[in-house]
Image: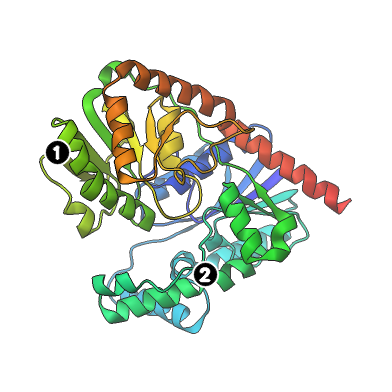
């Protein structure tokens, strides 16, 4: 097949956030049997410009809008442009931030000059564009934003104007998501929870939603002998609110219970842009690193990986990544979303309350044999069900169904 992928950022095998890793696994899996063209935006985040160069160097047809750091009056011009777009429109700020008018020009010219068998549009930020074609359109919803009550607690933590803007922005998500989903022949969600949310929020989409958990490029396993006793790791992009909530729950409520029963315990919190409240957790046994050049050495040294995520949707790359590396994982039921296959529970430990989460950590830290066996089973499970090729195969199945519906 000739496939066009449209992504909000370049696929990367090493990145501080989950989306570039998901995109890279998808691209790797599809490139095995298909001809891919890529339209993307290369911003100022670490490695994005270099990623475009690497993809082009291996012969991929890449059409990238390259952002540069505006200087002087251009900086104020961009800020005004973004603010005007948000104030005059109905789209959420995240979409405004990713918007580039040049992307629409590239799409229009590319669809006029080339014929594709399938167009895959990744993330709701790219759903704002027009796709003027009769080619089957598949949209990937990375995370459904659900309506919620007004966040009165947030008012106590920020100034009034900022709080009003955040609440107004959140209120835009329902209408915006519906308008995006309706453009596409099929919408794939990573978890059953998100698929059901789409069908609930937009009942007319129920017949077009499919569950397709993302894949990962299977890395070499970590060296079990490199594990450091009583060291636990949480990693995440801290621009994402669920990761901030997880870090605060871990540092403020779970760690005190762990200290009582395991005095030598250490926690690493690793990820870009930790906000002040996360940085404030740093102490003698909690290290807040910020971004690191490579995450694998930290995975290797950690005795246990934890993902105490309580809010948000989508699937957790941090969990899948740890399992693929052969690490034992403690997470919540929400953190394990998307990992069950054919009725089989994934080989990890889940707990949804503070005491239960702490006890699960303590049990695994005290039993080297069980912890290592859990990590071994986790790696086998991911390799069998969540490889890059497995993900691509499921996309091919959805495409075949789309073709059948058209015939």
Residue at 58%, 25% in the rendered image? 384
Q: Nearer the viewer, residue 9 or 398?
A: 398
- Residue 220: which disc? none
Q: Which mark is residue 173?
A: 2
Residue 81 seen in render: yes
User: x, y percentage for residue 301?
Assistant: 26, 26
Identify the residue under disc 1: 285
| Distance of label 1 from label 2 (alpha carbons) | 39 Å
Residue that appears at 54% across and 32% down: 345
Image location of residue 218, percent across then percent down:
49, 28
Query: Is 218 situated above or below 316?
Result: above
Residue 154, percent across and down? 31, 70
**Frontmost residue, 246 versus 259:** 259
* Residue situated furthest bottom in the rendering: 88
Q: Position of residue 46 (x, y in %)?
A: 34, 49
Q: Is residue 282 left or right of residue 205?
A: left
Q: Is residue 132 above or below residue 222?
A: below
Secondary element under disc 2, as helix, strand or loop, is helix
Q: Quadrant of the N terminus?
A: top right
What is the quadrant of residue 244 in the picture?
A: bottom left
Q: Residues within 10 Å of mark 2 (few under 14, many from 20)?
A: some
């Amino acid at each position: 097949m000739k496939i066009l992928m449209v992504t909000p950022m370049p696929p990367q095998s090493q990145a501080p956030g989950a989306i570039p890793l998901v995109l890279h696994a998808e691209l790797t899996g599809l490139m095995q049997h298909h001809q891919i063209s890529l339209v993307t935006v290369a911003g100022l985040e670490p490695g994005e410009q270099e990623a475009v160069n690497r993809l082009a160097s291996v012969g991929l047809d890449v059409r990238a809008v390259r952002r540069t750091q505006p200087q002087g009056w251009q900086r104020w011009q961009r800020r005004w442009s973004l603010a005007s777009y948000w104030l005059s429109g109905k789209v959420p700020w995240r979409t405004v931030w990713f918007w580039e008018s040049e992307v629409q020009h590239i799409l229009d010219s590319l669809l006029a000059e080339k014929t594709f068998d399938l167009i895959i549009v990744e993330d709701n930020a790219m759903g704002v564009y027009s796709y003027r074609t009769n080619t089957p359109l598949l949209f990937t919803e990375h995370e459904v934003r659900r309506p919620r009550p007004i966040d009165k607690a947030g008012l106590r933590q920020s100034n009034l104007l900022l709080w009003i803007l955040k609440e107004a922005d959140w209120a835009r998500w329902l209408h915006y998501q519906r308008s995006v989903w309706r453009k596409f022949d099929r919408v794939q969600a990573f978890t059953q929870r998100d698929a059901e949310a789409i069908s609930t929020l937009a009942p007319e989409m129920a017949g077009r939603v499919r569950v397709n958990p993302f894949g990962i490029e299977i890395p070499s396993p970590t060296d079990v002998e490199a594990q450091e006793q009583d060291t636990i790791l949480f990693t995440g992009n801290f621009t994402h609110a669920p990761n901030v909530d997880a870090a605060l729950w871990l540092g403020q409520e779970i760690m005190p219970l762990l200290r009582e029963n395991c005095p030598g315990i250490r926690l690493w919190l690793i990820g870009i842009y930790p906000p002040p409240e996360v940085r404030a957790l740093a102490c003698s046994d909690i290290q807040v690193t910020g971004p690191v050049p490579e995450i694998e050495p930290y995975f290797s040294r950690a005795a246990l990986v934890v993902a105490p995520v309580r809010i948000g949707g989508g699937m957790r790359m941090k969990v899948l990544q740890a399992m693929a590396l052969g690490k034992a994982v403690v997470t919540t039921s929400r953190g394990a979303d998307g990992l069950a296959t054919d009725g089989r529970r994934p080989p990890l430990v889940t707990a949804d309350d503070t005491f239960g989460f702490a006890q699960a950590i303590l049990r695994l830290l005290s039993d080297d044999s069980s912890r290592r066996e859990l990590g071994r089973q986790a790696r086998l499970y991911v390799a069998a069900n969540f490889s890059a090729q497995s993900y691509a195969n499921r996309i091919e199945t959805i495409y075949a169904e789309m073709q059948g519906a058209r015939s």
